[in-house]
Image (cartoon, rainbow, N blue to C red):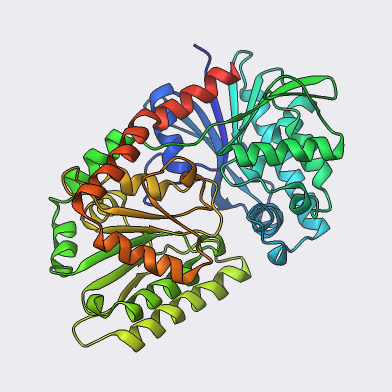
Amino acid sequence: MSRLVVISNRVSSPTKRAVQAGGLAVAMQAALSDHGGLWMGWSGKSSGAREPGKPVFREEGRVTYALTDLRRADIDEYYAGFANSVLWPLCHYRLDLTDYARKDMAGYFRVNRFFAQQLVPLLRPDDLVWIHDYHLIPMGSELRHMGAKNRLGFFLHIPWPPPDVFFALPVHETIVRSLTAYDLVGFQTQFDADNFASCLEREGIGRALEAGWFEAYGHRFQVGVFPIGIDTAGFAQLAQNAVRSGSVRKIEESFRDRDLIVGVDRLDYSKGLTHKIEAFDKFIAANPAFQGRATLLQITPKSRSEVLQYATMQRQVAEFAGRVNGQHGTPDWVPIRYVNRSIGQATLAGIYRVAQVGLVTPIRDGMNLVAKEYVAAQRSEDPGVLVLSRFAGAARELDGAILVNPYDIEAVANAIAQALSMSMEEGRQRWKQMMDHLLKHDISKWCRDFLEALR
């Protein structure tokens, strides 16, 4: 079997399991633990002004980790600059938040070249190379320029916008052209794949062949849809075990005789956090019977604090939650419990299991694994209800959820009321059709499908 080589911006620490819900780290940890291979990426550390040395290697089970530092200027320009201040908002349809600078763009391509230079000496001729996400779009092209003949695959975990949005990027043609160096380009949904194909055709970069195949610069490559899954059975078992732990029992006890609505979102403008809080506010105001009885537990780990918009947003979300608590709260009831840090995955699984409603309402999301984890964590005899944004990739799969438009505050408030009032029979039917799908389309199937197509 060919060795699997994975490259991502950040690598899950080989000595410390990821604590966040969902995300690339959790997904790839599961995939590589099964398959074995090499995982390369940024260590998360800065070498200051010095040029970083060779990667540091660590072994754990069947996985070899190759971690490399980056210079401070690289982090500022490649990561905080072009990747997270240009590509991230652009791909989430937020042109108003893009902050393009030529030096950041140059840093982005420079760091991709650096990663390619670090990887080439480590490659074996039959390695399958799987590159992940918007940070590393040009890396395949850099590897080709350095003579790599391996099968190269790329998977985008975030949305790909339509041409009229993506073409606002000054170097859009270079970015699109970079993706044609891969043998397989994977997206979360058919919408994303169609948007990318439209970009190819509008710019005259690629020529469509048979279904899913394109040709550009004499190279044939495939565009496919691979919705990322979770370790469904494993997560269900984790949740079942977690409710017996002291920490989860204490949380459950604190919500005794109250309805728990849980939201878990990284601190990011794509997650629609202020919209969610406004909807919960409207739900409480419009449903007096739930005043003093329903509580929103919103877990929101900080992220990208080096990007100005995120620090501003952190204050704004806290202010929104404080205003709702001040307006509706009583001495013995806090409507919103706002937790601004990461929670261990086992504890999160237990919280999902005891929550009557999972409220997942991003304004744009590539997939959203929290929605899938919430479904997997439920008790089959009395499952909670998922309220899900129609703008999350997961909405294409989880048809048992109550789908909402997160911009329609009143509709989301009504959906919360519908979820809390739903009969047990309807709740079971909705949950079962989602759980059956997730058991069949889990993380192993995602990995297997992508690698089979790449081979």
Image x and y of residue 265, in percent: 43, 59
Going 21% across and 56% down the picture, which residue do you hit?
354
Going by the image, does 435 lie left or right of 390? Answer: left
Residue 178 seen anywhere in this rendered image of the structure: yes
Which residue is depicted at the point 63% across and 55% down? Answer: 92
Residue 60 appears in the figure: no
Where residue 100 sits, quadrant-wise, is: bottom right
Residue 111 position, x and y percent, is 71, 44
Question: Residue pushed farthest top?
Answer: 1
Quarter holding residue 42:
top right
Position of the C terminus by quadrant:
top right
Residue 29 is drawn in which quadrant? Answer: top left
Vertical position of residue 77 compared to residue 7: above or below: below
Position in image of residue 247 (x %, y %):
18, 59
- Position of 274 relative to 405 (above/below): below
Residue at 63 percent across and 32 percent down: it is 154
Count of marks placed on residues: 0
Judging depth in this view, the residue of 405 and 233 nearest the camera is 405
x%, y% of residue 355? Answer: 24, 58
> In the image, 354: left or right of 80?
left
Q: Is residue 63 depicted above or below 242 in this figure? A: above
Q: Nearer the viewer, residue 150 or 354?
A: 354
* Residue name at image x 66 percent, y 18 percent: 150
* Closer to the camera in the image, 391 or 138: 391
